Amino acid sequence: MCGVVGILGHDYVAQDMYDALVTLQHRGQDAAGIISFNGRFHTRKDFGLVRDVFHTRHMKRLQGYAAVGHTRYPTIGKNVLEDVQPFLGPAPFGVVLAHNGNVYNAPELREEIFTKDHRLVNSDCDAEVLLNLLTKALTKQNPDHLKPEHVWKAVESVHKRAKGSYSTVAYVAKQGMIAFRDPYGVRPLVMGKRTSGLATDYIFASESVTLDILGFELIGDVGPGEAVFIDEKDRKVYRKRITRRTHIPCIFEYVYFARPDSILDDISVHKSRVRMGRKLAVKIKKAKLDIDVVIPVPDSSRTAALAIAEELDIRYTEGLIKNRYIGRTFKMPGQKIRKKSIRYKLNPMKLELEGKKILLIDDSIVRGNTSRRIVQMMQDSGAKKIYFASYYPPVKHTCPYGVDIPTKEELIAHELSVDEICKSIGADKLFYADIKDVFDSCIKGNKNMKDMCMACADGKYKTGVTEKELLAHASDRSTSRICASLDERSDQDQQLNLV
């Protein structure tokens, strides 16, 4: 997952872009980048949080009325600056592009682009692959001025060649801004506008919270397989559904990725998690356990944990306190230092744990490493019993759409039963949500939503790829193994209070 933003304004937009990326910091903390345009392109990209990448001297250089920005969580590519988005291409006119998702056939496309299109992809990032696919298709039409029909043909070409998920924003110099999603709309992308006098600025972003905070009016979602083109000359907005497929957004956006104050595809993330919590509480209630207190694993689990506590009529409290100022643990040398840092990030409150029978709520269990350490910390603090509840079903399968789960062997639920997982993480009882309950919790917010991608739980890859194909790509994706796993709560600081 990553955060992507495109702004087409009238004057200096870099400050808005900076603020937008801060609102999407939870979607990627490895690196950040902005490319702006005022007759020429200006670039700033580096590793780290948004606040660390952009200083006053950088912001002064990022002049222009249009910009594309990105916060990076890498699932393809290496931990090198060459792979940090956005990417810039010279033709036609000059194009800057960033995306959120995972083009899992990027290695094959990179070779094809070189041998057939005679273009060099200079990074291992799939965004540069998308840039070349789009610009090749635009250049082939040889436009004197970019028109909607040129964009529609180019995006159609991308849809035919790129496999996987991609929510993409691109700016073409002095021509306009383009946004499009893959045919299945796996990753989110919303559009908004802000009018001041006679001037109207436009924005595309991964989540609606960005629009709320920057004062943009939400126009709606860029649809699955849809392309949007805003002509810079007259600021007309053109939209077209290029490729028609069943809409299957990633359900994990609502479980974990997105901020609770976002609305994606007309579904409230907050309300979805509330419903997930209530449905899981029904299952827990049937076990007739003696529970003293409900405690969330911060931060994304709080919403569901509150709903569970209310449904069970059990006291809710904070028992794990997160230090938000510790560096990301997976970059630290040595296993002892890594474990020490995780311990520094989550500190148990002994007064809330000692002698208590605790119901611990988390959004998921992927590899099980962090769950095991948290349970051990709570036991060391004197907890009498620890009942663990995940409001997402067991993660058993690889993900080709933007989550770093390269092999099934890394997943604790791949071979172990629920009782065996419970024993492995050291809990006294383990509850998982039913996949139907999670699905129903989401689609209740949008009656038109008929399906979602839950492949990591049910193994059904509805875009046509098979798990066998994914395993064939695993070696190409192995360079991203430095990425934080979903299990590393301390690595992916979800729902940061940044705004």
Image: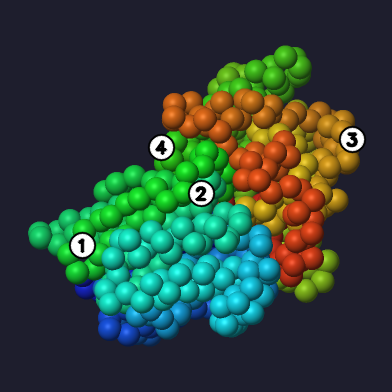
Amino acid at circle 1: Arg
Badge 1: residue crowd in 10 Å (few <14, some 14–19, many ≥20): some
Q: Earlier in the sequence, mark 1 or mark 4?
A: 1
Disc 2 to disc 1, C-alpha distance: 26 Å
Residue linked to disc 3: 420
SS type, badge 2: loop
Amino acid at circle 4: Asp
SS type, badge 1: loop
Q: Earlier in the sequence, mark 2 or mark 3?
A: 2
Name the residue: 56% across, 26% down.
Answer: 440
Which residue is nearer to you in this view: 388 or 271? 271
Amino acid at circle 3: Glu
Residue linked to disc 4: 266
The answer to whether residue 334 is left or right of residue 8 is right
Which residue is nearer to you in this view: 438 or 432? 438
Name the residue: 75% across, 54% down.
Answer: 470
Amino acid at circle 2: Pro
Disc 4 to disc 3, C-alpha distance: 38 Å
- Residue 183 is tagged as 2
Name the residue: 85% across, 37% down.
Answer: 421
